[in-house]
Amino acid sequence: MIRIRGLTKYFGTHLVLDRVDLDVERHEVVCLIGASGSGKSTLLRCINRLIEPDYGEIALDGVSVEDASFGKTGLQRRVGIVFQSYNLFPHMRVIDNVTLAPRKVQRLARAAAEARALEVLALLGMESFAHAYPEQLSGGQQQRVALARALAGQPDVLLLDEVTAALDPELVGEVMAAIRGLKARGLTMVIVTHEMGFARGLADRVCFLDGGRIIEEAPPDQLFAAPEHPRTQAFLHRLLEAGRL
Amino acid sequence: MIPKQPDTPPPPPRRRGFDWRTALVPGLIGAGSIALVFGGLAWLVSQNENWPRIQRQFFSLDHMLAALPRVAHGFLTNMQVWLIAMLCIGVWALLLAVIRSLRGPWFAPFRLMVVLYIDIFRGLPALLLVILFGFGIPALRIAGLPNSGLFWGGVAMVLSYSAYVCEIYRAGIDAVHEGQRAAARALGLNEWQVMVYAILPQALRNAVPSLMNIVVALQKDVALLSVIGVRDAVREAQIYTATTFNYSALVVAALLFLLATIPMARLADWITHRDRVKRLQMAG
């Protein structure tokens, strides 16, 4: 479904992504792991063109993401993203956050957009907060609203950029449970995460990035139990020592 | 081992009774010291040999009452110009700020125009602009354009103040976190929609305290229009002074200005304070 070839990105003269190849099948969940600065988030943001890569290409169902057929918003409609810091609009109620894109981008009538929004909010257990403002919610609740906002456009792919990294530890569970629910519904996801337990339990495939390259790529049980590349071993060893594995 | 917990927590502490001493003594000392200092100053001033003349020239009650109706009528003009100019500045400056914040390459010439506009109008004294517009443009006698100095003076005020207000708006726009823009773009909103639905509502809220200061400043700067013959409070007072050689009319105008600006300043303080409290709560 997603096909990435030779993706390369410099920030100034610093090489962030180095000829990355990656394929993601429909209904597949791929986790990207690696140390800070390894290029995982940049890779993710290239997929929906929040960042423009310098070289290489990304195709969605065989069509390049730069293709004119996507128009101005077609790509964003098919690829949703959720950020580490939620980035909900603080001046809008939950329901308005979730219906903004369906109403303004997809030109849905308000009633239809709200019906769809409530459906998605219910899926994430947030329908009773539809008329709250984001700042009245806990971090975990805000992140579930952010998930709902990304899903309201009915994307084919969801990108998650360290969505639990800003949460208090006791709130991580509810967001992870929500994401597991999405996997059960067959959503295709590319997930950047520091939570190895999460990656292990959820992913169909785990990619380990280091220095802007995908160094090792395997099903989670294999990658975590018997990593082949020395740098993957070193990374997992460091996590183990830090008590994060 | 878990220590044995007592069955009930201790009762809430007894409320301390009202203590006259702690409540009153600081207040009394404060009032006393204010009376002493201000009384001393008043005594010094009134002992000055020139005081009776100053009083006659500036604080003559008869002249004040005689001048009040005209000055008050002029002040009404001030208030009208202030209100209309405020609205025009609010809209015009917002437009400038939005244009300046748009990022697409097609907007480059418009961004440049706004930058030049700000450089020019912020760099020129408002007084010069008022004279240039208020006398200059009516003197051209171009058919179809209004000929009133009041109108063109008002335009000069709007152009000058908009340059400042534009920068205030822009600071408010810049203060909105970059993640908000990323989130809005990732939802597929175009640049204009990102601005209108995601950025501006937050930017305006950021800008309110600074805008309030501008509102207060504008309220008194409207008096600049008096130099081009607009019969505002200052002009009316000057006319009265010119015929009577007594300056009490100007003091009346001064009092009227204070009457209007001090409540506005308090309101601005209050809004700023409320905003600060809200932000602190959010940060906590």
Image (cartoon, coloured by chain):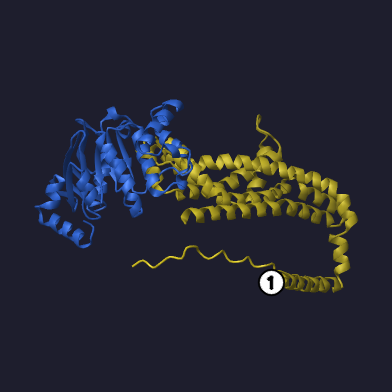
Chain colours: A blue, B yellow
Q: Where is residue B268 in the image (x, y as percent from the top left)?
A: 63, 52
Chain letter of the residue beneath label 1 in the structure image: B
Decide: is B184 above or below B38. Answer: above
**Which quarter of the image is occupied by the C terminus of chain A?**
bottom left
Determine if residue B113 is in view. no
Question: Quick one: quadrant of the N terminus of chain A?
Answer: top left
Measuring from the top left, give residue A167's x and y in whole percent: 35, 52
Which percent across, then down, holds residue A185? Answer: 26, 33
Please state the total of marks drawn on the protein image: 1
Instruction: Classify mark 1: residues with Cα within 10 Å, few (<14), some (14-19) or many (20+).
Output: few
Q: Which residue is at the front of the view, B33 or A151? A: A151
Q: Where is residue A171 in the image (x, y as percent from the top left)?
A: 35, 50
- Position of B113 relative to B51 (above/below): above
Answer left or right for A95 relative to B94.
left
Amino acid on which disc 1 is placed:
Thr
> Viewer-proximal residue, A72 or B104?
A72
* B20 and B177: which is toward the camera: B20
Work out whether residue B57 can be spotted: yes
Q: Which residue is rendered at x = 73% and y = 48% of the image?
A: B226
Residue at the disc numbered 1: B22
Residue at 39%, 68% in the rendered image: B3
Residue B209, relative to residue B8: is it above or below?
above
Report which quarter residue B140 is drawn in. top right
Quadrant location of residue B43?
bottom right
Horizontal side of residue B58 vs A19, given as left or right:
right
Left or right placement of residue B101 versus residue A64 in this view: right
The kind of secondary structure element at disc 1 is: helix
